[in-house]
Amino acid sequence: MAVNVSNIVVGEATIQIDDSANATDIAAMDAFDDIGATQNGVEISWEPDMVDIEIDQYGDAAKIIQTRVKVMVKTTLAEATLTNLTHAWNYGSTDISAAQDGANTTTFNFASQGVTPYEKALVITGKAPGHTASVTKERKFYTKRAISMASTQLNMKRDEASTFAVEFRILPKTEDVGYEYGKIIDDD
């Protein structure tokens, strides 16, 4: 097999995010807000759990089945905005408010969320195979149900930037038959 170096993808990705209810179709999702810079890129993982079905005659697995799958998106948000903190801590944009008295303040109100986590929709855009200095090709990952799952912290240190590590668990949307977890699209 001949090597095609244009298939080697290098480069950062951007993330757009909005409320899961606004993820009606791809055109609507392309209009989501970009949440700014990330640090160390974006990682999308597909984590299947496999089970061996063993039989005595083989002394090994006669068959392997997938019992479940977990899809995750991991990144570090490099811009320490209150909006990004709400995404990292699994709150919605309605939990941020501007001062009503004309003061130049913004407030993130966080409290007990109850048992139902806040669902978001994500669009991740990066370079696709065939991208060169003269040819722009994009790969986009669309998912309609994402929940921030990992513990994260707000740090303010003298000698390093404040960032928010975030891990989104991607859940299936059962109405989207055949692409329940989302779509990955390479432009031509």
Image (tube, helix red, strand yellow):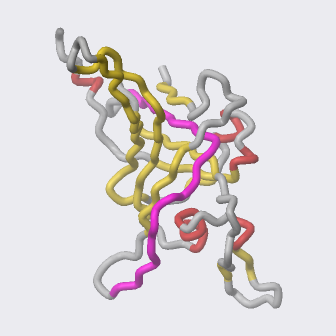
Please check the rendered image and state whether residue 148 is part of the magenta-colored stretch, yes or no.
Answer: yes
Give the answer, above or below, for where 44 lies relative to 105: above
State the residue in front, 186 or 134.
Answer: 186
The residue drawn where x is 23% and y is 20% is: 60
**Residue 176 locus on image (x, y percent):** 68, 28
Locate the N terminus and report the quarter of the image it occupies. top left
Q: Residue lying farthest top? A: 1
State the residue in front, 102 or 107.
Answer: 107
Give the answer, above or below, for where 188 lies relative to 69: above
- Residue bounds of the magenta highlight: 135-157
The residue drawn where x is 50% and y is 35% is: 140
Q: Residue lying farthest left? A: 2
**Residue 103 locus on image (x, y percent):** 74, 90
**Residue 97 locus on image (x, y percent):** 74, 77
Q: Residue lying farthest front? A: 56
- Please indicate whether residue 96 sits to the left or right of residue 14 in the image: right
Q: For residue 34, what is the image quadrant?
A: bottom right
Q: For residue 112, what is the image quadrant?
A: bottom right
- Please indicate whether residue 74 sits to the left or right of residue 175 in the image: left
Please check the rendered image and state whether residue 149 is part of the magenta-colored stretch, yes or no.
Answer: yes
- Please indicate whether residue 56 sits to the left or right of residue 30 in the image: left
The residue drawn where x is 50% and y is 43% is: 124
